[in-house]
Amino acid sequence: QVQLVESGGGLVQAGGSLRLSCAASGIIFSINAMGWYRQAPGNQRELVAVIDSGGRINYADSVKGRFTISRDNAKNTVLLQMNSLKPEDTAVYYCNAKVINYAGNREVWGQGTLVTVSS
């Protein structure tokens, strides 16, 4: 069983910074992509940023220039550095990983961590 454990959410004022981290554990042969999604109340879950095993990155337009995603393949971890935060960034942030193990290809989600940005 593969698990993703997130940390780093919290309350911050607009213009501030937070860093989210996510660590994958369990039986893992490889991870194709790791990323972050978010869901605000009343909204659908949306992509924030994703990084594949080769380091290719995709950001949502709304976070480009403010958020930075990075990954440590050896440790199966992914970080999201969030700067210049805005109230509209308030959401539950979910870590996501596309994992390969003995069961084949699996998509795994973390439990979510709340980010609240006050104006």
Image (cartoon, rainbow, N blue to C red):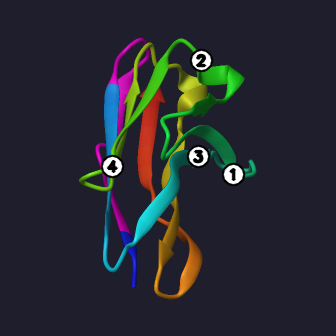
Alpha carbon separation for disc pair 3 and 2: 15 Å
Q: Quadrant of the N terminus?
A: bottom left
In front of the other: label 3 or label 2?
2
Disc 4: CA contacts within 10 A as few (<14), some (14-19) or many (>=20):
some
Q: Amino acid at mark 1?
A: Arg
Q: Residue at x 63, y 45 (%)?
A: 40
Alpha carbon separation for disc pair 4 and 3: 23 Å
The picture quadrant where one finds residue 14 is top left
Residue 45: assigned label? 1
Alpha carbon separation for disc pair 4 and 1: 25 Å
In this rendering, is residue 115 above or below 24? above
Residue 64: assigned label? 2
Q: Is residue 111 visible?
A: no
Q: Amino acid at mark 4?
A: Asn
Q: Which residues are magenta?
A: 4-17
Marks 4 and 1, the one that precedes in the sequence: 1
Query: Which residue does the numbered mark 4 point to in the structure image?
Result: 73
Q: Secondary structure at mark 2?
A: loop
Q: Amino acid at mark 2?
A: Lys
Q: Secondary structure at mark 3?
A: strand
Q: Is residue 66 visible?
A: yes
Q: Position of residue 41 (x, y in %)?
A: 66, 49
Query: Which residue does the numbered mark 3 point to in the structure image?
Result: 38
In this rendering, is residue 99 above or below 43? below
Residue 22 placement, left or right of 43: left
Marks 4 and 2, the one that precedes in the sequence: 2
Q: Secondary structure at mark 1?
A: loop
Q: Position of residue 106 (x, y in %)?
A: 57, 75
Marks 4 and 3, the one that precedes in the sequence: 3
